Structure formats: C-alpha cells, structure tokens
Amino acid sequence: MASPDHSNDTKEKILQTTLDVIKREGFDSVTIRKIASRSDANIALVNYYFGSKDKLINEAIKGLLIGFRDTFDVLDHVSVPPKERLKLFLTRYVQVIQQYPELVLHTIAAGSAMFASQHEYGEFLQATGFHKLQKVFTEITGEERPESLMMMVTQIFGAIFLPALMKPLLESGAGVKPAPIDRQIDFLFERYFPEHGEAKERGK
C-alpha cells in the first residue's frame, strides 16, 4: 500500500497536470486517459482519487480559487491604512492570476457551465469578499451607498485584473508591454482617489 505522503504527492501531480492541460488546451481537452498518461499514473488510480473527469476538474479549479479567496484576508488588517490594504489585496490577486492567466480566462469563459468550486467561490464573494472590499472603499471615500460601492468594486477589478488577464495577448499580439502591477495600481489610485482618504489615513 502506498504511504500517505506518496498518495498526496500523486494526487498533487494529477491535479497539477490537470491545471496545465486546462491552461494550454482548455477544459474540453481534459480526459482521464490523458491526465493519467501525463502524470505517470494509471486510469484506475485517477478514477479512484477523483471519481470522474468533472470531479477532477472541479478539484483542480478549487486549488486556484482558494488562492484567490486567501487574498481577501489582507483586507482584515485594520492596523494598515485602507489604501495600502487595497493595494496589497490587488497585488496578491494579480499574482494569482499571473500564475495561470489562460486558465482564469477559460474558467470565466465557461459561463453558466460552472463547476461546484466556482459556485462556492461565487457564494464567498457574495457573502464575504465583496463586503470586505466595500468596507475598504467606504473607509477611503466615505461612500456608503451599496450600489455605488459595488460599482467601485467592479471598476477597480476591471482596471487592474483585465490587463493581467490580457497580458499574453497584449505582449505577443499587440506588442504592448504592461507596466508593473504596483505602478498600475499607483497610477489608478492617483486618478480614482485624488481627494479621498489621505486625511483619514493620517488620523485627521
């Protein structure tokens, strides 16, 4: 019988192989036979660990989405000024995107054909993630209307995350080299929050 450590290593290799196939070839290219072959496992073992192709894909995506979910923790560090918390959150979120930009695009493109892990992440955003962001925006701007705060969230997401997702296309197809993420965030904040937050951050 394989040791627990060996079993975990094998499962992780299978999940990593699945992520790589989705990244390079898309969801439709994932088959149990292909994943088994590329991860040096047999079909029976992949089925034993995950049960089906959909469950395998779901577990692979879950690992990526946990990375996104963990980035929200920095927003709870109230000892850090709100703009700095927001910048740290955006930076870390982009770092997760940059690991697998094509996979994130494939996940978004799946639309309504979502896996359970995507539904779970959506529920987290609705119940917790968006509220944390809205609270930070209120600290920075003083805005309290939910609809306005949600517009701020979506606008900031679009301004920072879309370029990260498009980076491969921008660089290879359009010959555009995006600025480093910290510079992009500073540039955005200078224009999005020109009159807000500084007095609060100084404790005035």
Image (tube, grey):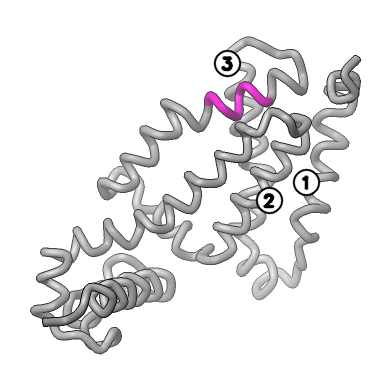
Q: Give the numbered dot on residue 147.
A: 3
Distance, label 2 to label 3, CA atoms, is 25 Å
Q: Indicate left or right for 76 with 128 as reference.
A: right
Query: What segment carries the magenta color?
Result: 131-136
Looking at the picture, tell me which residue is in the foreground, 122 or 24.
122
Q: Disc 2 or disc 3, which is closer to the eye?
A: 2
User: In which quadrant is the C terminus drawn?
Assistant: top right
Relative to 155, does residue 165 appear above or below in the rendering?
below
Magenta span dominant secondary structure:
helix
Callout 2 touching callout 3 (CB < 8 Å): no
Mark 1 or mark 2, which is nearer the start of the sequence?
A: 2
Q: Quadrant of residue 164?
A: bottom right
Q: Is residue 173 above or below residue 96?
A: below
Under mark 2, the amino acid is: Thr
Query: Label 1 amino acid?
Result: Ile
Q: Secondary structure at mark 3?
A: helix
**Which residue is found at the position 85% from the left and 45% from the top?**
187
Residue of label 1? 185
Judged from the image, the secondary structure of the residue bearing numbered disc 1 is: helix
Residue 113: x percent and y percent? 27, 48
Q: Which residue is labeled 2 in the image?
A: 91
Residue at x 39%, y 37% (from the top left corner):
122
Frontmost of labels 2 and 1 is 2
Report helix, strand or loop for mark 2: helix
Disc 2 and disc 1 in contact, CB within 8 angstroms: yes
Circle 1 packing at 10 Å, graded few (<14), some (14-19), many (20+), is some
Residue at horizontal 57%, vertical 16%? 147
- Label 3: few (<14), some (14–19) or many (≥20) C-alpha neighbours in 10 Å: few
Instruction: Name which residue type carries label 3.
Output: Glu
Residue nearest the observer in this picture, 118 or 46: 46
